[in-house]
């Protein structure tokens, strides 16, 4: 048997990014979709492609239109204008119960008088499947969701996380092309929710089913999704992978909605390979490296994440150095967040990871400190 030379690079896992492939055919296509309820426009001329095997997240505040999008996919609402295609077919004339789509509700909607096994089998029985097919499929779903030993129990006899998995197994039993998840983890406590997020990802990858999740939980969307659509007032503000959404937001709205951020507003000028933002009288300008094309003197914004901001007792020899005072401290175990008040009252957050087993904080309230970050850490935004 021959072996490859030790210095030959091994192929890594294929990157899943069909949205970057010009020949990839979307599973779902929203084409100039508008949905109105009387005078209120819930979805405004929306165009979006979602691909097979994606775990796609619709993220936004209450009333932004994400649930309306899901209800149109499920068949509970129809577009006022435009089309929604599933595998190239306009789904508007297809009744909800005949679509290759299933929906998992936040309340789980399990039948309390049926066992776990019977709950999972319910949809298959309604379809008239034979007993052997039903038994094989239900057993497969029980193994997938690790519920084999709970098959004979009723929903009230199992935990919230287990009920969530029963609802997921029932939704997947009919092998839909598309599974819609409406705030599926909202009823779980924080630790169980975090554990279940990874279980959802694992199950989605094993089944190959396309998942579309509606959530207002930014951390949940960033954890589970292959791509995230950030919405506001019925419009898509940005659609991208979680790292791009976080590190390269396309607007102040997205930067502010996703995670913690400090945003400086001012006038911008080109300075060689950098831009400089004049943001407050008597304060040094902020320097940022950016591919953006902005004109001198226009209003612009610099967004900076707290983990990118360093905090010091002594003034560092660097750019983007500001002096302030510690006014609040948040200890989160693995890291500490310092709220630093700058001259004029503006606040900026800086984070330190607690890598040492030491309960003493390196900075305390009322400390005079310096904060700084590099030119590549800030994001320059036009709007």
Image (cartoon, helix red, strand yellow):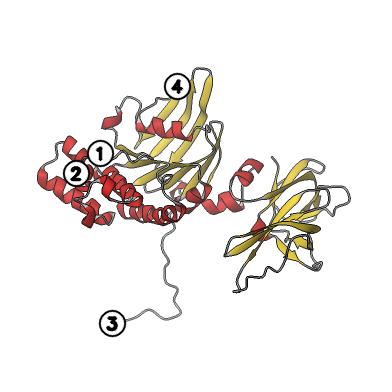
Q: Which mark is residue 1?
A: 3
What residue is disc 4 on? 80
Q: Which of marks 2 and 1 is in front?
A: 1
What residue is disc 1 on? 111
Secondary structure beneath label 2: helix
Distance of label 3 from label 2 (alpha carbons)? 52 Å
Residue lying farthest left? Answer: 131
- The foreground one among 349 and 206 is 349
The image quadrant of residue 360 is: bottom right
Q: Which of marks 3 and 1 is nearer the N terminus?
A: 3
Secondary structure beneath label 4: loop
Residue 254 image position (x, y, % from top left): 61, 43
What residue is disc 2 on? 118
Distance of label 2 from label 4 (alpha carbons)? 39 Å
Q: Nearer the viewer, mark 3 or mark 2?
A: 2
Pick the quarter of the image with the C terminus: top right
Residue 284 image position (x, y, % from top left): 84, 55
Distance of label 3 from label 1 (alpha carbons)? 57 Å
Left or right of 16 in this view: 302: right
Q: Are marks 3 and 2 in contact (CB under 8 Å)?
A: no
Q: Do we see residue 294 in this rendering?
A: no
Q: Residue 129 carries which label?
A: none
Secondary structure beneath label 1: loop
Secondary structure beneath label 3: loop
Left or right of 125 in this view: 351: right
Pick the quarter of the image with the N terminus: bottom left
Distance of label 4 from label 1 (alpha carbons)? 34 Å
Q: Are marks 2 and 1 in contact (CB under 8 Å)?
A: yes
- Relative to residue 327, is residue 129 depicted above or below? above
Residue 193 image position (x, y, % from top left): 43, 52
Q: Are marks 4 and 1 in contact (CB under 8 Å)?
A: no
Q: Earlier in the sequence, mark 3 or mark 2?
A: 3
């Amino acid at each position: 048997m021959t072996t490859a030379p030790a210095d030959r690079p091994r192929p890594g896992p294929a990157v899943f990014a069909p949205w970057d492939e010009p020949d990839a055919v979307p599973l779902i296509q929203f084409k100039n979709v508008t949905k109105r309820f009387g005078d209120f426009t819930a979805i405004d001329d929306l165009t979006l492609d979602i691909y097979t095997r994606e775990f796609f997240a619709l993220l936004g505040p209450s009333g932004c239109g994400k649930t309306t999008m899901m209800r149109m996919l499920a068949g509970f609402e129809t577009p006022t204008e435009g089309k929604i295609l599933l595998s190239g077919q306009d789904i508007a004339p297809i009744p909800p119960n005949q679509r290759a789509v299933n929906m998992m509700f936040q309340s789980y909607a399990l039948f309390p008088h049926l066992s776990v096994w019977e709950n999972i089998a319910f949809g298959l029985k309604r379809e008239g499947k034979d007993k052997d097919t039903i038994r094989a499929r239900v057993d497969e779903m029980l193994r997938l969701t690790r519920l084999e030993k709970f098959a004979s129990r009723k929903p009230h006899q199992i935990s919230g996380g287990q009920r969530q998995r029963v609802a997921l197994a029932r939704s997947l039993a009919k092998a839909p092309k598309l599974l819609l998840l409406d705030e599926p983890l909202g009823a779980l406590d924080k630790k169980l929710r975090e554990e279940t997020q990874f279980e959802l990802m694992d199950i989605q990858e094993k089944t190959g089913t396309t998942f579309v999740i509606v959530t207002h939980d930014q951390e949940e969307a960033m954890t589970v999704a292959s791509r995230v659509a950030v919405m506001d007032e019925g419009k898509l503000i940005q659609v991208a992978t979680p790292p791009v959404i976080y590190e390269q937001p396309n607007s102040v709205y997205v930067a502010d909605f996703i995670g913690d951020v400090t945003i400086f507003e001012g006038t911008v000028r080109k300075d060689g390979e950098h831009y400089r933002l004049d943001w407050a009288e008597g304060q040094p300008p902020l320097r940022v490296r950016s591919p953006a094309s902005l004109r001198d003197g226009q209003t612009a914004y610099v967004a900076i994440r707290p983990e990118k901001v360093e905090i010091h007792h002594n003034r560092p020899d660097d750019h983007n150095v500001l002096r302030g005072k510690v006014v609040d401290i948040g200890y989160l175990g693995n890291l500490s967040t310092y709220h630093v008040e700058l001259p004029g009252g503006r606040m900026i957050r800086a984070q330190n990871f607690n890598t040492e087993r030491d309960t003493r904080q390196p900075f305390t309230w009322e400390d005079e400190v310096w904060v700084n970050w590099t030119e590549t850490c800030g994001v320059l935004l036009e709007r």
